Amino acid sequence: MSTARPSLIPNFSELAADYDAVLSDVWGVIHNGIATFPHACDALMRMRARGGVVVLITNAPRPSEQVARQLERLHVPRETYDAIVSSGDLTRATVKQRHGQSLHHIGPERDRSIFTGLDVHFAPLDTADYVVCTGLEDDEAETPDDYRGRLEVMLARKLFMVCGNPDVVVERGSVLVYCAGALADLYATMGGEVLYAGKPYHPIYEMALAKADVAAGRKIARSRVLAVGDSVRTDLKGARTAGVDFLFVTSGIHAEELGGRERPDDAALATTFAVAGGAPKAVMRVLRW
């Protein structure tokens, strides 16, 4: 990861020839939960058309098959990507490892698909062996503080939490809503034990890189892999963890603090990367070929 001031580039085509694989974030890069960004889909399709591999890497707390169905509903062309790896995939693997233990789920009903096909015993918080958190039950009205009482019960029982989505916030349309990462961070600051199943942690990148190798039919050198995302906390840090270059998209969750969606402020960008401890390879306002 570079420490030099990154260049703000208008077109992804300036970078594409230097890479054989792209690990692209989904929310904030390809869509905002409501509307798809056709220019981003076009850029990734063009990357694949020139022989590159595209693996979508997302902190969505759902299995990758469910993510694919959501992308289809949002009219993201299937030709946009070769494979998907989700935080939900990592969460499911952890639940399988804890076979025989009961769990308490914190999150909206729509996230229950993360447990589909697994032999799971659900239990109340006062008897469960551990907790799986996929989000806030009503993320349009609640904040992490609304869960402090439940977290105190968990802490008193020394319950282990699996965080099925390490994002703190995500854009839904033009609104930022809290994610499971916000609850997990609060629990961790209270002294609770948390496993974050997703970006920026190493296992999800290993899974994504393995899928890229399969799609390419060969081992792809890390120096030929570019991660793309809009989050400093998960995407920038995760790319550094994985040892791959990173392209930062400014029009996502950091847009307002960086000076707005239309034109990021150079000083704000420099401060953001200084705090993060490293700069990306390049910066774009939106992903566009």
Image (cartoon, rainbow, N blue to C red):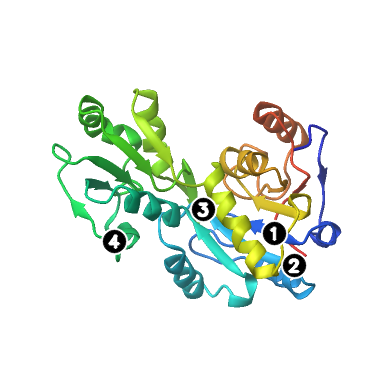
Residue 140 against residue 11 in the figure, above or below: above
Q: Amino acid at mark 4?
A: Leu
Question: What residue sits right under mark 3 in the picture?
Answer: 174
Which of the two labelled residues, at mark 3 and mark 4, occupies the earlier sequence position?
4
Which numbered disc covers residue 184?
none
Q: Residue 234: name its quadrant.
A: top right
Q: CA distance from mark 2 to mark 1?
A: 8 Å
Number of other residues with Cα within 10 Å of mark 3, as a class: few under 14, some 14 to 19, many 20 or more:
few
Which of the two labelled residues, at mark 4 and mark 1, occupies the earlier sequence position?
1
Q: Amino acid at mark 2?
A: Gly
Q: Nearer the viewer, mark 2 or mark 3?
A: 2
Question: What residue sits right under mark 2 in the picture?
Answer: 52
Residue 224 against residue 76 in the figure, above or below: above
Q: Amino acid at mark 1?
A: Val
Q: Residue at x 27, y 30 (%)?
A: 148
Number of other residues with Cα within 10 Å of mark 4, as a class: few under 14, some 14 to 19, many 20 or more:
few
Q: Are marks 2 and 1 in contact (CB under 8 Å)?
A: yes
User: On the rendered image, what quadrant is the N terminus found in?
Assistant: top right
Which of the two labelled residues, at mark 2 and mark 3, occupies the earlier sequence position?
2
Element marked by disc 4:
loop
Q: Are marks 2 and 4 in contact (CB under 8 Å)?
A: no
Question: What residue sits right under mark 4 in the picture?
Answer: 118
Which of the two labelled residues, at mark 3 and mark 1, occupies the earlier sequence position?
1
Q: Position of residue 188 (x, y in %)?
A: 38, 28
228 or 162, nearer to the observer: 162
Q: CA distance from mark 4 to mark 1?
A: 31 Å
Q: Amino acid at mark 3?
A: Ser
> Is residue 29 in view from this perspective?
no
Element marked by disc 1:
strand
Which numbered disc covers residue 22?
1
